Image (cartoon, rainbow, N blue to C red):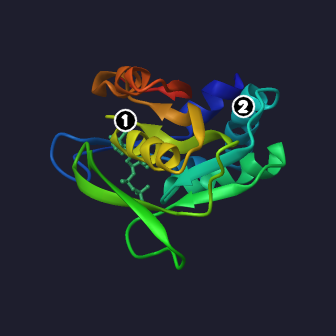
Amino acid sequence: MSQLDLIKSSIKSIPDYPKAGIIFRDITSLLEVPTAFQAAVDAITAEFKDKGITKIVGTESRGFIFGAPVALALGVPFVLVRKPKKLPREVISQSYTLEYGEDTLEIHKDAINTNDNVLMIDDLLATGGTIDATAKLIRRLGGKVENAAFVIWLPELGGKERLAKEGITSFSLVSFE
Ligand code: PRP
Ligand code: ADE
């Protein structure tokens, strides 16, 4: 089995969660297979190892799981984008819509510098709202961000096109129609 087949086959699909009509693509089952988890981290790391990335930004909460090990593998700082009122220092905030709701994200004001070339990492790309909001936070702080990496891409929800319009190229490991 290829590494990508191993990754895809370890992701469970749960119909009608969290509400009717949504098929939830569950990465917790992938995390329980160390070879699959390692393969996902390695594939993202390999794609970006020579691209001049100076910081990884991971978005709460599943973005933390993949963002942190990639940051360690690339030897660059890891920055958290979190849901409201979780970060202790001064923050800026950005609201966004999800496939199944609405939310706000925050980042520490001092976490990004004007010379940063940031890679955003999350577990899954659906509508792109989460990563669009994350990119806006990074850019408001003066950082350059042109790339996002995901384990899972849901092509039908248009996230890749939405992010492309914002100048962001999406890299993903597996997709589910
Ligand atoms: C999920 C997922 C992505 C986002 C993708 O996060 O982990 O961050 O939705 O959807 P989008 O492309 O339409 O924005 P969720 O907000 O459910 O938070 P969680 O990671 O804390 O479960
Ligand atoms: N986040 C947004 N849409 C999702 C889905 N279908 N499965 C898992 N996480 C998601």
- The disc placed on residue 43 is 2
Image position of 51 (left or right of 30): right
Image position of 134 (left or right of 18): right
Residue at coordinates 38% horizontally, 29% vertically from top-left? 154
Residue at coordinates 54% horizontally, 77% vertically from top-left? 89
Where is residue 83, by image quadrant?
A: bottom left
Question: Gap between marks 1 and 2, in whole Å?
Answer: 21 Å
Q: Which one is nearer the viewer's eye here, 56 or 156?
A: 56
One can see residue 54 in this view: yes
Q: Is residue 88 above or below residue 159?
A: below
Q: Is label 1 in a helix, a strand or a loop?
A: loop
Q: Is mark 2 within 8 Å of ligand 1?
A: no
Given the current orientation, which residue lies at the most extreme left position?
A: 20
Q: Is label 2 in a helix, a strand or a loop?
A: helix
Q: Is mark 1 within 8 Å of ligand 1?
A: yes
Where is residue 158, by image quadrant?
A: top left
Q: Position of residue 157 (x, y in %)?
A: 29, 28
- The disc placed on residue 128 is 1
Other-residue count near label 1 (Cα within 10 Å), few / some / many at <14 / 14–19 / ≥20: many
Other-residue count near label 2 (Cα within 10 Å), few / some / many at <14 / 14–19 / ≥20: some
Quarter of the picture containing the N terminus is top right
Q: Which one is nearer the viewer's eye here, 102 or 176?
A: 102
- The disc placed on residue 157 is none
Q: Earlier in the sequence, mark 1 or mark 2?
A: 2
Q: Position of residue 35 (x, y in %)?
A: 74, 43
Q: Position of residue 117 (x, y in %)?
A: 67, 37
